[in-house]
Structure formats: C-alpha cells, structure tokens
Amino acid sequence: MISYLVRLVLVLLFICFTLISCNDNSAEKEIKTEKISFKKEGELSISRNDSIIVSKIDIEIADNEYERQTGLMYRNSMEENQGMLFVFEDAEPRYFYMKNTEIPLDILYIDSNFKIVSMVKNAQPMNEASLPSNFPAQYVLELNGGMANAWKINEGDVISYQKK
C-alpha cells in the first residue's frame, strides 16, 4: 500500500512539473523598444586647413554622461547629413566601442582646438572592441560609415559648430 502511494505521488509530481515546464510565457517576455529619432541640436561644419568647407551637417550633441554613454546605440539608421557630436570637459585619450550600435560609423577624434587628430573609419556594428583615439581628444564626431571617405575628411581638418 505504501509503495502504491509513493508511486502515485511521484507520478502526480511528474505531471505537475511537466505542466509547469510547458507553460509558454513568451508573450509576457516580449520587449518592445521605441524608435529613437534624430533631434537636431546644432549645426557643424568640417573644413580643410585652407578653410574650404568640406561638409555641413546637422548634429545631436551628447554633452552629459548619460548621452555620451548612450550615443547612437539602438538606432537603425541616420541620414547622410546627420551626426552626433560628443562634448567632453577636457582633452584626454578617448575609447569608443560599437556595443548595441546597429549602423557602421566613422568616428572622428577632435582635440581642444577643433582639429581632427585621428579617425576610425567604418567601425563595425555591435562590435565591443575598443576603438581608441591616437591623441587626446575633447570632442568626438560620429558619422555614417563611409562619409569620411566620401567627403575626403583627413586628420588635420577642423570642425566648427553652433548649438541650435
């Protein structure tokens, strides 16, 4: 009799565990993300040393810790004439990466005199490898991947920008 009860309890436990493990909560776990739209906060010009303007773009400005850490993450596109300018308090070596960034980017490191001191072209999406500046930078400009080549931007070129 005890053996029968033990087997019955084990069978009931097995059925309960099976039912629990088959419970599909996938609808509850679905995460919806909201599209992040570009917000024009200023305009930026890139010029050669001879002051010929290479390009003018609309920019978002990342000038606080949260905005600098988030950057262009979770965005799936950006217009050709748009970019994000990261503004830091001082010039020092900078290290960017592409974690959670869905589009390839050109990353331009800019010193305190607004001169482009180094670049990373076509940084690959979702890559967590460190992309360091070669020299201290106070500003960093992110553009769509390939734009530095298309606009023939070079180290030594300079930027100027105005907040909106």
Image (cartoon, grey):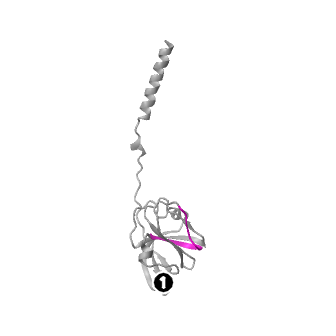
Helix, strand or loop for the magenta stretch, by majority: strand
Report the front residue among 81 and 22.
22
| Figure quadrant of residue 14 | top left
Report the front residue among 21 and 138.
21
The percent coordinates of residue 38 (x first, y second) are 41, 66
The percent coordinates of residue 96 (x first, y second) are 53, 65
**Is 132 colored magenta in this rendering?**
yes
Task: Tell me the kind of residue under disc 1.
Answer: Arg
**Is 133 colored magenta in this rendering?**
yes
Outermost residue on the top side: it is: 1
- Give the crowd class for mark 1: few <14, some 14-19, many >=20 residues within 10 Å: some
The percent coordinates of residue 81 (x first, y second) are 40, 73
Find numbered disc 1 in the image and state the secondary structure of the residue it sits on.
Answer: loop
Q: Which residue is mark 1?
A: 48
Q: Is residue 15 above or below residue 33?
A: above
| Figure quadrant of residue 132 | bottom right
Please identify the quadrant where the C terminus is shown: bottom left
Q: What residue is shown at x 42% (from left), y 45% (from top)?
A: 29
* Magenta stretch bounds: 129-143
